Amino acid sequence: MIQKTVIVRPERCVGCMQCMIRCAEAHSQSKALASAIREPILAKPRIHLGVGPEGRPFPSKCRHCEPAPCQDACMPWAIRDDISPGLKIVDPTRCIGCGMCAMSCPYYVIRFYRDAAAPERPGVAVKCDGCHERVAAGGIPACVTACKTGALAFEEVNLYLKEGTNRLANAVYGVRI
Amino acid sequence: MRYVVVGLHAAGRSACLWLRKVDKTAEVIGLDPSPLPIYSRPLISYVLAGEMTSRDMVVAGDGFWQERGITVLGDRAVALDPARGGLQLASGRSLAYDRLLLACGARPRPVNLEGPMAEQVCFFRGRRDLERILGRVRPGGAAAVLGGGLVGFKLTMGFLKRGMRVALIVTSPRPLSLNVDAHVGNWVGERLKNTPGVTLLTSTSVRRVEAGSAAALRLDLDTGQSLEVDIVAAGKGVIPETGWLSGSGLECDYGVVADQFLRTEDERVYVAGDLAQAPDLIHGDRRVNAIWPVAVEQGRVAALNMAGIKATYGGSMAMNAIPVFGSKMISVGVVNPSLTKGCDEITTQGAGSGYLKLVFREERLIGAVGLDAPPRLGELAFAIRRRLRRRDIPSWWLDNPKQAAPLAAPGGFLARNARLT
């Protein structure tokens, strides 16, 4: 089976934050921006725009590491890898909001907010779930639909690796691409 | 191939999962004396605080083990014979293994108190301790907590939530002295002092436990005072459960000594979790870091090595996150530069971004502590593993820890090897 994943090419990012908006929309109850902003528990983005060197934008999202440090640190075993292959997904009904996962994440992509899936909890870990429901229904992740510059793309990981190999070859032989 | 895993909590459960992942056909036997289902031990503090029911602590019911084809025996291992590859169980059975993982953890450190009622001191480690404590909780009554570490702090907050007055008795001059630096420790101390119902007694220890007159117990303190309380609970750390291994010939120092593959002296016996005295990332020697993420990671690394896949354990380090009075307190690695030679520190305390201190030794990052800081200690823990130098931390990161891109982003030190420009 060909596994596709969201590939981030930060050098193409212009910092428009459309991905954040579409991410929050896709994780809202109503799945539509106009009504999502009026929901009692606001859906939050799971992709973040960091500020890099010289103020350059850097889209940062969960890499779904394997093995995942957040999953190692999760005491109630709320970060599951059995929901969708290759994805680490937080089960908000088990999350106790202790912060151990956010503390272990090397990429600073886990935040704590109230979540409509567990409304009684003051804050649960919110992070990228790979839009596994959209993908299972034949769609592509919401952040990718929003990106106009190609900074986010839903691609086969091997193609990206091949591209990296070509870039390395070009860099070694001094070819500018 | 038969794998036997002794202890099925953090390290043991993780090891079982990985053994099954990498070896689909082998026989995996788990051994745990506590009755099933397996629960997550740290969650007992949430049950004490009434934020969770004890049913919610369960992380692996019967179905969990059946699905993965792992046999679970509710028995205790009492002796190990590495030469013959056999375990002696409390029920009288013996169990042979091809590869063995010792993950039976630690027990609470005894408090060594005198007095006729010293046996009444409760500990806070597992479900039995929780039940014992819950059976003695009296709303409106008084409780004493010995030990100002994270367990002591959790106990204090738990008793408070249950409507009790709490005296937190700490031997050191401030609470959380081993977990956070003086700034954060003193802040927590101040908050505790100002919390109605809490009495914080620092630089104080308990001498004797006697029967009380007004309440069940009377504590005699070394300051000459005495306290009448309904319940005494102690959280003074843990000691590895090595007693039953004394005749096995395995090298036991503080815990069971393991190499970088988490293998003991016997090549068929591995060790993980609170029992393992394994390489320490910062100090360079072998230490026990009795924390959850270390146990789970060690369980994984040991399982891979047991299955014949070489995996090197990078080393453990202390790491904690705990909500304190609505603030998030986080620490990793060495947090008290004064206790370690040749240390240096830098602090960022910007408006809105909380307190974040980075600790360096010989220009290398070795620890950090934060209070309401952006939760970036994962990056720093990662950076400690990569031996980050002080000059490698980009200024854009330090100037704006709330918004800055991860250190692994382009331009950051951790991405340097991958950068092609």
Image (cartoon, coloured by chain):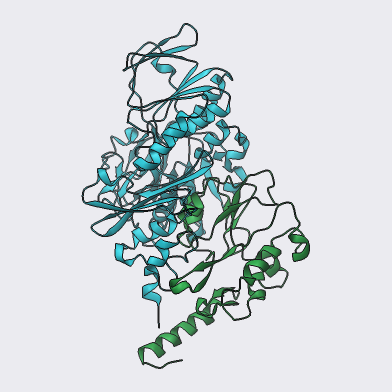
User: Residue A168: x, y in percent?
Assistant: 40, 85
What quarter of the picture does the N terminus of chain A occupy? Answer: bottom right
Q: How many marks?
A: 0
Q: Residue at 28% across / 35% down in the picture? A: B247
Q: Residue furthest left?
A: B342
Left or right relative to A165: residue A148? right
Q: Position of residue B335 (x, y in %)?
A: 33, 46
Q: Which chain is cyan?
A: B
- Residue B94 image offset from top left, x and y in percent: 41, 37
The residue lying toward the viewer, choosing from A123 and B258, is A123
Give the colour chain A carries in the figure. green
Judge from the rendering whether residue A147 lies leftward or rightward of residue B16; answer left or right.
right
**Which residue occupies 25% across, 43% down?**
B339
Q: Is residue B17 visible?
A: no
User: As drawn, which residue projects farthest toward the front?
Assistant: B351
Compared with B362, B94 (above or below) is above
Q: Is residue B167 visible?
A: yes
Measured along the vertical axis of the image, is residue B143 above or below residue B84? Answer: above
Establish if A139 lies above or below B17.
below
Residue B37: quadrant of the picture:
top right
